[in-house]
Image: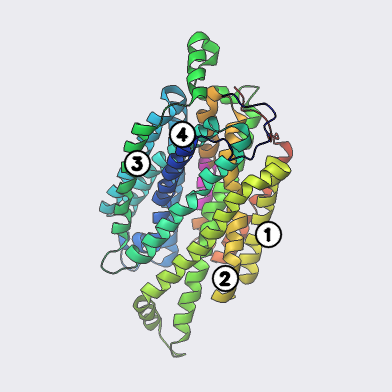
């Protein structure tokens, strides 16, 4: 049944069971997608330390963690562009199956890593599937839902990512922190999402818009699907550059600022342990005390991750009503400005305030520093025609990863003893300034609120 042009129904009214099913499966894929990325974040302080020579100083451990995170961003970029274009050519459902199998298998193989470079290489391969799954699923959700429901369905899809982080937090608290299990078992859990592919193969079909685009491509050679070069045509180059830059800022600040909110809780717990030692305690005694209280310190870190993620999840969902109220550009402006202010306040003013203050501040910081990410799933599909939607969305989101990856290497160098030797607080504060780039860029971004998807 066709829907009237002036459809004033609430976004969820008239949504079919199949449309809900598409949103559910896409969201589950994204949840497990995020788990595969965040399980490293939840365990990197233990995993990387165990893969380096005993006695490696903290600055070098942090550096190799940043190398692995950078490899993850680069892998996601390559996978997102490749699989996004592939989905425009062979279909959304087939490509989604390939991506989920890829990130599930290589996360599980990480159990066998013995060196830092093996960890980094496997992070790269995991990320290829992770980046590809987002590009395919976001395009599919946008194509299946009607115009009035695009913002909410896109926000729900992207907002479901917090459950992936919650799973990683649970794995960090009850698997990684458990002396009888450890970080390798946390990665072994990553094999489970492969089962989702059976459901996808059984229940999902290609969107009507994609089928129509493929038929048009057969009739007209100028309407071929999945051509990356066309993203830089006169008609689309502004959209492409805006999408890439918005994603680059969001991803650079996520991996360079947002994820380190949890470390403030860990530091607070470590300081509490050290404060209970005699004033003349030696460095060896301090290290022994920290090792004895490892489980409690790890739990504090995971609580910090949980608080930041919970606030971030609410921010992701809030993007939908906000962008329906003040437009896509206005919502991006709100969250990027909020991320800048909250990050500077957290790391420069409140970082040593103790757990009581952090319990309040971390969710607010998470809300403002993560909420704009839901906009990528809403905004990017609205910038490109159907025959290039997976290609364009995947390219923007994942070329942003390429631009964001060097920030992690720079971040590692900023904290190394043989680099700038900056503190965590000062390094994160400097990287918060990247939000200013997005604020300037939004002056040139097109507003897509209320428009039909381009065909």
Q: Earlier in the sequence, mark 4 or mark 3?
A: 4
Residue 163: x and y in percent read 46, 53
- 149 and 126: which is toward the camera: 149
State how far apart marks 4 and 2 are (Cα): 42 Å
Q: Would you say residue 178 sits in the magenta stretch? A: no
Q: CA distance from mark 4 to mark 1?
A: 41 Å
Q: Nearer the viewer, mark 4 or mark 3?
A: 4
Q: CA distance from mark 2 to mark 1?
A: 16 Å
What secondary structure predominates along the stretch shown in magenta?
Answer: helix
Give coordinates of residue 341: x percent, y percent.
Answer: 68, 59
Identify residue for label 2.
358
Which secondary structure lies at badge 4? helix
Closer to us: 314 or 331: 314
Image quadrant assignment for residue 126: top left
| Residue at mark 3 to residue at mark 1: CA–CA distance | 40 Å
In this figure, which residue is indicated by the disc labeled 3?
196
Label 4: few (<14), some (14–19) or many (≥20) C-alpha neighbours in 10 Å: few
Q: Quadrant of the N terminus?
A: top right
Residues drawn in magenta: 401-408
Label 4 close to label 3 by CB (< 8 Å)? no
The C terminus, quarter of image? top right
Residue at left offset 60%, top offset 55%: 369
The answer to whether residue 159 shows anywhere in this view is yes
Label 4, label 3: how far apart the Cα atoms are: 17 Å
Residue where numbered disc 1 is placed: 341
């Amino acid at each position: 049944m066709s829907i009237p042009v002036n459809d004033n129904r609430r976004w969820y009214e008239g949504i079919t069971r199949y449309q809900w099913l598409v949103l559910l499966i896409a969201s589950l894929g994204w949840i497990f997608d995020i788990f595969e990325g965040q399980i490293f974040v939840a365990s990197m302080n233990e995993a990387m330390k165990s893969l380096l020579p005993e006695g490696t100083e903290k600055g070098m451990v942090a550096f190799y963690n940043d190398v692995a995170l950078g490899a993850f961003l680069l892998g996601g970029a390559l996978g997102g562009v490749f699989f996004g274009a592939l989905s425009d050519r062979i279909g959304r459902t087939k490509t989604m199956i390939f991506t989920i199998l890829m990130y599930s298998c290589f996360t599980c193989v990480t159990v066998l890593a013995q060196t830092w470079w093996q960890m980094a290489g496997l992070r790269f391969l995991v990320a290829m599937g992770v980046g590809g799954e987002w590009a395919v699923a976001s395009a599919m959700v946008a194509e299946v839902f009607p115009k009035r429901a695009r913002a909410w369905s896109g926000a729900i899809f992207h907002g479901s990512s917090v459950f992936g982080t919650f799973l990683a937090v649970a794995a960090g608290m009850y698997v990684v922190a458990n002396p009888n299990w450890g970080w390798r078992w946390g990665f072994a859990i990553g094999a489970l999402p492969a089962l989702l592919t059976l459901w996808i193969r059984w229940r999902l079909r290609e969107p009507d818009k994609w089928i129509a685009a493929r038929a048009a491509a057969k009739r007209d050679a100028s309407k071929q699907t999945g051509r990356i070069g066309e993203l830089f045509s006169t008609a689309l180059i502004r959209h492409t550059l805006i999408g890439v830059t918005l994603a680059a800022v969001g991803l650079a600040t996520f991996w360079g600022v947002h994820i380190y909110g949890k470390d403030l809780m860990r530091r607070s717990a470590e300081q509490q342990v050290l404060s209970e030692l005699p004033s003349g305690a030696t460095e060896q005694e301090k290290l022994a005390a920290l090792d004895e209280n490892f489980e409690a310190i790890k739990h504090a870190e995971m609580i910090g991750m949980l608080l930041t993620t919970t606030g971030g999840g609410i921010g992701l969902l809030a993007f939908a009503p906000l962008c329906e109220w003040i437009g896509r550009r206005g919502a991006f402006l709100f969250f990027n400005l909020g991320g800048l202010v909250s990050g500077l306040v957290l790391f420069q003013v409140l970082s040593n305030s103790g757990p009581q203050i952090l319990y309040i501040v971390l969710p607010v910081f998470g809300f403002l520093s993560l909420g704009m990410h839901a906009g990528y799933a809403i905004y990017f599909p609205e910038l490109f025609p159907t025959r290039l939607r997976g290609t364009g969305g995947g390219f923007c989101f994942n070329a942003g990863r390429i631009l964001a990856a060097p920030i992690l290497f720079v971040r590692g160098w900023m904290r190394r003893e043989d680099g700038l030797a900056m503190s965590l607080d000062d390094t994160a504060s400097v990287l918060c300034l990247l939000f200013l780039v997005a604020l300037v860029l939004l002056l040139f971004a097109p507003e897509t609120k209320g428009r039909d998807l381009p065909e």
